[in-house]
Amino acid sequence: MKDTVHAARPGGGRGGILDREGALAKLLIAPAVLYIVAMIGAPFVLAVLYSLSDATTGDPSLHLVGFRNFAAVLEDPVFRLALRNTFVFTLLSQSIVIVLSRILANALLKPFRGKWLVRFLILLPWTAPISLGTIGWLWMFDSIFSPIDWVLRYLGLLGTATGLLGPQTNMYWLGVPGLAMASVIIVNVWRILPLATVIQLGGLSSIPKDLIEAAEVDGASPWRRTLMITIPLTLPIVSIAFLFGIVFTFTDLVVVYVLTRGGPVQSTQVLSSWTFFKGIEAGDLAQGAAISLFMFPVLAVVAILILRMARRTEVV
């Protein structure tokens, strides 16, 4: 058998690197590893060094000062507010995304005319640059010319003495702390929803139709089929969609920066935006790096928990 294999190779030798699976696998994965090291590993190490120094944009030299920056960050009330806002912003928006994406995915599984157009419109927010889309939302939330306020006034919900939202003619979406946070969450949901819908659509499409048909024959109601079949079988997929959404939201800067710049009165400040304002605009690279490093352990723990849960449910 060995003679036959050697005879099939040119020159009867051991073959080149392309004939060895282990070496070929390492060769193919090398560009991805180099990319991760260059784009993630090196900046992470630099952030750690900056966080332990007194570097500024005027003097970026590294003079190590220990954990002084972390102590200063923890004493900063804006940082504590940004940390709380980050969790609120992330959990609320992703909870809404998971529910809406499941509804959209179920609707897109049904046969109807124009399904391709609906799918295109749903995917459009994900393909468009987030900065341009957020600028469009900035106009929609304008304190004077907001089309949302116009619709609310037309429906009688705003601008009348008996209106549900009050007698004022405008909502001032980005000028009131509660409304500003709601606006940021709405835009983030609009941004993440297409990706979550595609992921959930793939999970629902992979469910064997025999299980659904057997449940229907046994007389199971739609709610029972959802609770006993659909949710358990798609839980790993939902976990991955939730993980992607948490990572994208937790590290997002563009939505908050374009819409509110952390205002009003720092009420929509999150860790990523406060890192930018403190480290770049204020020029304190050391404290900016220290703030950014607080995101790493949180994301690492969340990723480990979600992936373990997805693996456990998949095995079961």
Image (spheres, rainbow, N blue to C red):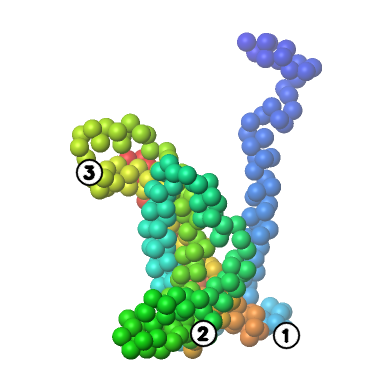
Pick whichever, 257 or 22, lies toward us.
Answer: 257
Measured as percent of width and height from the top left, residue 101 is found at 42, 55
**Residue at horizontal 57%, vertical 77%?**
139
Query: How crowded is the residue under tag 3: few (<14 C-alpha within 10 Å), some, or many (20+)?
Result: few
Mark 2 lies on residue = 143
What type is the residue that disc 2 sits on? Ser
**Residue at horizontal 54%, vertical 73%?**
137
Mark 1 lies on residue = 58
Mark 3 lies on residue = 221
Q: If you read the primary sequence from the N terminus, does the residue marked by circle 2 or circle 1 appear first?
A: 1
Kindly report the distance in space between the C-alpha atoms of the residues bearing marks 2 and 1.
38 Å
Pick whichever, 278 or 152, lies toward us.
Answer: 152
Query: How crowded is the residue under tag 1: few (<14 C-alpha within 10 Å), some, or many (20+)?
Result: few
Q: Residue furthest right?
A: 11
Asked if residue 306 can be seen in this view, the reply is: no
Pick whichever, 181 or 39, lies toward us.
Answer: 181
Mark 1 vs mark 3: in front: 3
Q: Is residue 48 above or below residue 231?
A: below
What type is the residue that disc 1 sits on? Gly
Pick whichever, 138 or 130, lies toward us.
Answer: 138
